[in-house]
């Protein structure tokens, strides 16, 4: 597609916040790792300048994209039908963010996903396990009221970055205006494209159906795959990483991370 001008990046940086900074830090790590692997496999691919990151330009391309990609403090306006694989990764991130807020309220704490500082996952110096490192890389220290927020935000942003990086560098991709990137779903205020996008979330992100109405929400699953759901006064509940109707089903072994199951309410749990 293009490598963005420094001016375009500067415009975006005025809106930067903590989570954007952490995501870009990990993206640069991933790009450096990919460069090093390429050179290791084929030394002729080495650039005289060595590793020079260009990933920031591609990140700008998905800022304000589809129904769910709002990589700043406007993330909570995201909603609507998923447009493509990139949009799905953004939805996963937003769902994690919404649960960060809900879970903090349940604890009597606060968690601001866009602005909470934390120690990000370290691709090079870490353990290789995103969940374990986010819980032991320093996020467990400091203000106890934000410890859980920092740990879970590290997991959410780390998983999003790892998955998004893989999508970005599939054949074609953002650099060539090809799938999984679709310039047709870039917003008018997306500064990354060669021209302003025509996608209007106000109209294009409306669901074609009416839901079952308002309801209290809870969260299901574990970070970095946690998501909110409507409980409908107890008619819907969480079992492990899935939701189910309590009217005709029940959750068996709910505290087991591998053996939980959803069974008919009249059957015996295995």
Image (cartoon, rainbow, N blue to C red):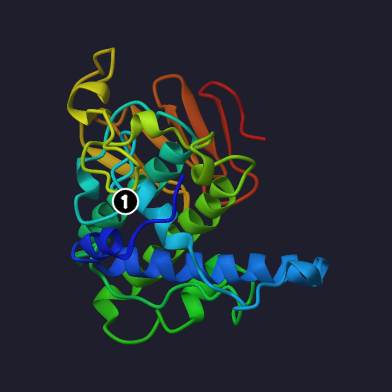
Question: Quick check: 196 left or right of 148?
Answer: left
Using a 10 Å C-alpha cutoff, classify the residue at mark 1 as few (fewer than 14 neighbours), some (14 to 19) or many (20 or more).
Answer: many
- Which quarter of the rendered picture does the C terminus lie within? top right
Closer to the camera in the image, 233 or 158: 158
Closer to the camera in the image, 127 or 172: 172
Picture layout, residue 128 above or below residue 189: below
Picture layout, residue 97 above or below residue 185: below
Q: Which residue is located at x 35 percent, y 31 percent? A: 185
Question: Quick check: 245 left or right of 252?
Answer: left
**Residue 96 visible at all:** no
Closer to the camera in the image, 228 or 231: 228
Picture layout, residue 85 above or below residue 38: above
Q: Residue furthest bottom?
A: 142
Picture layout, residue 5 above or below residue 255: below
Q: Position of residue 45 (x, y in %)?
A: 74, 66
Q: Position of residue 49 (x, y in %)?
A: 59, 78
Q: Quadrant of residue 117?
A: bottom left
Question: Quick check: 138 left or right of 266?
Answer: left
**Residue 252 visible at all:** yes
**Residue picked out by circle 1:** 99
Closer to the camera in the image, 151 or 71: 71
Q: Position of residue 240 (x, y in %)?
A: 51, 44
Q: Which residue is located at x 79 percent, y 69 percent? A: 44
Q: Quadrant of residue 12?
A: bottom left
Helix, strand or loop under label 1: helix
Q: Residue furthest front?
A: 48
Q: Which residue is located at x 26 percent, y 63 percent? A: 7
Q: Position of residue 181 (x, y in %)?
A: 47, 37
């Amino acid at each position: 597609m293009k490598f963005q001008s420094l001016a375009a990046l500067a415009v975006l940086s005025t809106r930067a916040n903590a989570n954007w900074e952490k995501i870009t830090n990990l993206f640069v790590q991933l790009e450096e790792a990919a460069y090093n692997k390429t050179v290791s496999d084929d030394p002729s691919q080495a650039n005289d300048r060595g590793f020079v990151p260009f990933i920031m330009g591609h990140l700008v391309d998905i800022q304000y994209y589809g129904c769910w990609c709002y990589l700043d403090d406007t993330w909570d306006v995201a909603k609507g039908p998923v447009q493509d694989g990139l949009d799905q990764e953004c939805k996963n991130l937003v769902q994690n963010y919404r649960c960060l807020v809900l879970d903090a309220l349940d604890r009597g704490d606060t968690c601001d996903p866009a602005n909470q500082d934390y120690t990000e996952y370290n691709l090079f110096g870490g353990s290789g396990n995103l969940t374990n490192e986010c819980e032991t890389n320093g996020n467990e220290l400091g203000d106890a009221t934000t410890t859980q927020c920092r740990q879970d935000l590290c997991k959410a942003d780390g998983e999003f970055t790892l998955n998004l990086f893989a999508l970005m560098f599939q054949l074609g991709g953002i650099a060539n205006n090809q799938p999984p990137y679709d310039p047709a779903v870039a917003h008018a205020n997306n500064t990354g494209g060669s021209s302003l996008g025509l996608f209007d979330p106000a109209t294009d992100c409306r669901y074609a159906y009416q839901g079952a109405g308002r309801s209290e929400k809870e969260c299901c699953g574990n970070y970095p795959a946690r998501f909110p759901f409507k409980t409908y006064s107890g008619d819907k509940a969480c079992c492990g990483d899935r939701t189910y109707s309590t009217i005709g089903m029940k959750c068996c072994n709910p505290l087991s991370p591998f053996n939980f199951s959803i069974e008919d309410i009249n059957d015996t749990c295995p």
